[in-house]
């Protein structure tokens, strides 16, 4: 046998050979990530998700592009008409960024829920950890691969929506629009990464992939669909709004509701992307329509919009880090055989 | 078996400590208040096949995981090829091929793809890796199935693929955890032949854990009997047998003699002869096999069977495991503790 047996024996296993060994085996997470990404893009799961997301995207753009044309004719004042593609929802079809707010978590969950327990179920984990890679490189590699797959789907989707929209509108995005779309893309990626980290954590904690998937979907349902109900219930119980309610009371109620809603990443994402995609929005909070608005009807530059969305983005990033750290430490402490 | 006294090899020479490739020193692993591995002192020499024999739950797998640096010992140290698995796990893992208990593969990947991933993880260059994988698949007899998905493989095929997988990294040490469980006898035979060949052709050191003694017996140079986290005995099969048996009982099959019982009873040292299940059973004060053979042949009979009872691994096994069940507290096995 070659290098290995001819190599160091017990007697001459000097620190230098150990050091050489350590150097030689750097970057194992890249190998794991490459394999996992390959698995993802070849999987049936990937195809189904792409179809689902593309259909949703096209539906929302299709329904948005009609009114945009009318609006464009009527009001040439409107800044960044192109971005309406992503935010306008004239009929019952939700706007594109709302669609992503709902479907994004599914993407995150789909690429993570069976990451670790899948290896356990197939009994490949002992074999994997006995290769010359650090144990954390397995979970890191899987997170990176999941994120890569999501980034890929999302990039295609945004490009497609923008392209189709441009075709329908007969106009392209300005440079400023492109910058905003890119910011939207990054925030969306962070938002989905949060769900990926959550599903990764569940895949470490739950023995069975099905349990992890169900748990993740339960969290998703509560935070995206039921959060509105919960928030309004809490708001109504703390600030009753009767028929003769004053503006202050109505406002207090609405504020409470928004505060509760913001415990859901879905609301944070909507806040952030709403501001980023709409230059004329000057607040992520409640805007009271008093007829004569106090705000000057002007569009903000991108950095000002970013500033508005800043804390939402920071919370999303922090949430992702906390969830991934939890997954990481739990995985590192688990016994290989557990 | 202590760390400071170099073990004797079969020729009785003191072998240099450099020849010990796997050495543990008071290796201990506790899970809560349960001790899985208890002060294990083990020394495995270069090029030998060592069988770790013990019932399920004796701590064999835990020991193996500690040797690979996959679980932290509570106390004590292990050295594999001179390297501490706790400090340089990657170096250890790059030199040790490991076939886990009930090995698994990515079901929707082919055999070759599975091995390719392992080759990548071991940083083998693509060209070398491909050649090596093809060679290994040939060695384990999976040429024809190399590009089939593993999901369709039988247990025996998976086990052979597992061996190929463990060998991808060109290891100097091979650790096989229960490699023969749940595969058919022919599969077991093939697997053990492969192990045998690896040792003789390439000088690979093999640590094989099993609870099936007959299989261990076939390939192992030395055996360590592992019960409830302790190594209660180790040595060659003959040594273990010699240590264990305080009685000499033989089963004898004789053909062509009418008065075999009387003939055998007359042999000096034989204290009793009984007939049971068509065989004669002798109880003697010492090894009388030579005399039995001579007497039967001289009398014109044919010896069809002559086996010492209670000296095969079954008896050893049973004895130690019974000891474990009976003894409350530390194992005070009858014959000598661990000799190496």
Image (cartoon, rainbow, N blue to C red):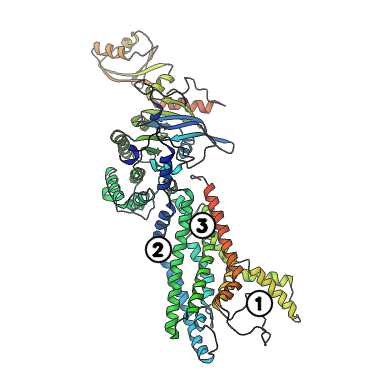
Q: Toward which corner of the image does residue B141 lie, by quadrant?
A: top left
2 or 3: tag closer to the N-terminus = 2
- Secondary structure under tag 1 reads loop
Q: Residues within 10 Å of mark 3 (few under 14, many from 20)?
A: many
* Residue ID at (58%, 69%): A266
Residue that protrudes farthest toward the bottom in the picture: A74
Q: Position of residue A49 (x, y in %)?
A: 44, 67
Are the residues tagged 2 and 3 within 8 Å (C-beta)? Answer: no
Q: Residues within 10 Å of mark 2 (few under 14, many from 20)?
A: some
The subunit carrying tag 1 is A
2 or 1: tag closer to the N-terminus = 2
Residue ID for mark 1: A286
Can you tell which of label 2 and label 1 is closer to the viewer? 1
- Secondary structure under tag 3 reads helix
Q: Position of residue A121 (x, y in %)?
A: 45, 51
Count of all numbered marks drawn on residues in the image: 3
Q: Is residue B313 left or right of residue A326?
A: left
Residue ID for mark 3: A200
Residue ID for mark 2: A41
């Amino acid at each position: 046998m070659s290098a290995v047996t001819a190599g160091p024996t017990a007697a001459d296993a000097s620190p230098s050979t150990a050091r050489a060994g350590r150097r030689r085996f750097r970057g194992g997470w890249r190998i794991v990530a490459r394999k996992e990404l390959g698995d993802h893009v070849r999987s049936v799961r990937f195809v189904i998700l792409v179809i689902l997301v593309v259909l949703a995207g096209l539906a929302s753009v299709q329904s948005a592009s009609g009114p945009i044309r009318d609006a464009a004719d009527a009001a040439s004042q409107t800044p960044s008409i192109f971005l309406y593609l992503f935010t306008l929802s004239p009929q019952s079809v939700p706007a594109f960024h709302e669609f992503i707010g709902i479907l994004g978590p599914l993407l995150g969950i789909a690429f993570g829920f069976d990451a670790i327990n899948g290896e356990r179920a197939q009994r490949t984990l002992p074999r994997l950890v006995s290769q010359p890679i650090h144990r954390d490189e397995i979970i890191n590699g899987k997170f990176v691969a999941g994120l890569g797959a999501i980034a890929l789907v999302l990039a295609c989707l945004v490009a497609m929506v923008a392209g189709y929209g441009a075709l329908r509108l007969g106009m392209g995005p300005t440079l400023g629009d492109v910058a905003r779309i890119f910011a939207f893309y990054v925030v969306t990626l962070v938002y989905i990464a949060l769900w990926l980290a959550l599903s990764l954590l569940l895949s470490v904690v739950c023995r069975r992939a099905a349990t992890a998937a169900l748990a993740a979907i339960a969290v998703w349902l509560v935070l995206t669909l039921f959060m509105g109900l919960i928030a309004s219930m809490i708001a109504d119980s703390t600030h009753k709004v009767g028929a003769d309610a004053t503006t202050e009371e109505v406002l207090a109620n609405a504020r409470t509701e928004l505060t509760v809603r913001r415990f859901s990443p879905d609301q944070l994402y909507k806040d952030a992307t709403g501001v980023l995609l709409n230059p004329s929005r000057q607040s992520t909070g409640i805007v009271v329509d008093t007829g004569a608005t106090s705000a000057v009807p002007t569009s903000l530059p991108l950095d000002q919009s970013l500033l508005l969305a800043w804390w939402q983005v920071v919370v999303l990033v922090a949430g992702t880090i906390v969830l991934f750290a939890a997954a990481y430490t739990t995985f590192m402490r688990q016994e290989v055989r557990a | 078996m202590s760390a400071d006294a170099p073990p004797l090899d079969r020729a009785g020479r003191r072998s240099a400590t450099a020849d010990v490739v796997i050495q543990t020193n008071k290796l201990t692993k506790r899970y809560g208040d349960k001790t899985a591995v208890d002060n294990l002192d083990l020394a495995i020499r270069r090029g030998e096949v060592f069988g770790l024999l013990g019932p399920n739950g004796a701590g064999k797998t835990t020991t193996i995981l500690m040797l690979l640096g996959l679980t932290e010992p509570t106390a004590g140290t292990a050295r594999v090829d001179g390297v501490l698995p706790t400090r340089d796990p990657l170096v250890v893992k790059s030199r040790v091929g490991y076939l886990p208990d009930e090995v698994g593969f990515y079901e929707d990947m082919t055999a070759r793809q599975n091995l390719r991933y392992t080759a990548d993880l071991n940083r083998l260059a693509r060209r070398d890796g491909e050649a090596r994988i093809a060679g290994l698949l040939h060695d384990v007899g999976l040429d024809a199935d190399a590009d089939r998905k593993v999901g369709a493989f039988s247990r025996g095929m998976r086990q052979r693929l597992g061996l190929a997988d463990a060998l991808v990294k060109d290891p100097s040490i091979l650790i096989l955890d229960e490699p023969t469980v749940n595969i058919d006898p022919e599969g077991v035979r093939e697997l053990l032949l492969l192990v045998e060949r690896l040792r003789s052709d390439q000088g690979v050191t093999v640590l094989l854990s099993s609870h099936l003694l007959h299989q261990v017996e076939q390939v192992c140079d030395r055996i360590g009997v592992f019960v409830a986290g302790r190594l209660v005995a180790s040595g060659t099969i003959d040594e273990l047998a010699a240590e264990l048996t305080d009685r000499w009982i033989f089963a004898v099959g004789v053909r062509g003699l009418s008065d075999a019982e009387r003939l055998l009873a007359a042999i000096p040292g034989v204290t009793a002869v009984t007939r049971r299940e068509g065989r004669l059973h002798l109880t003697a004060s010492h090894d009388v096999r030579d005399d039995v053979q001579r007497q039967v042949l001289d009398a014109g009979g044919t010896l069809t069977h002559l086996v010492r009872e209670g000296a095969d691994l079954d008896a050893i096994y049973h004895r130690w495991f019974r000891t474990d069940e009976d003894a409350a507290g530390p194992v005070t096995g009858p014959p000598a503790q661990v000799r190496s």
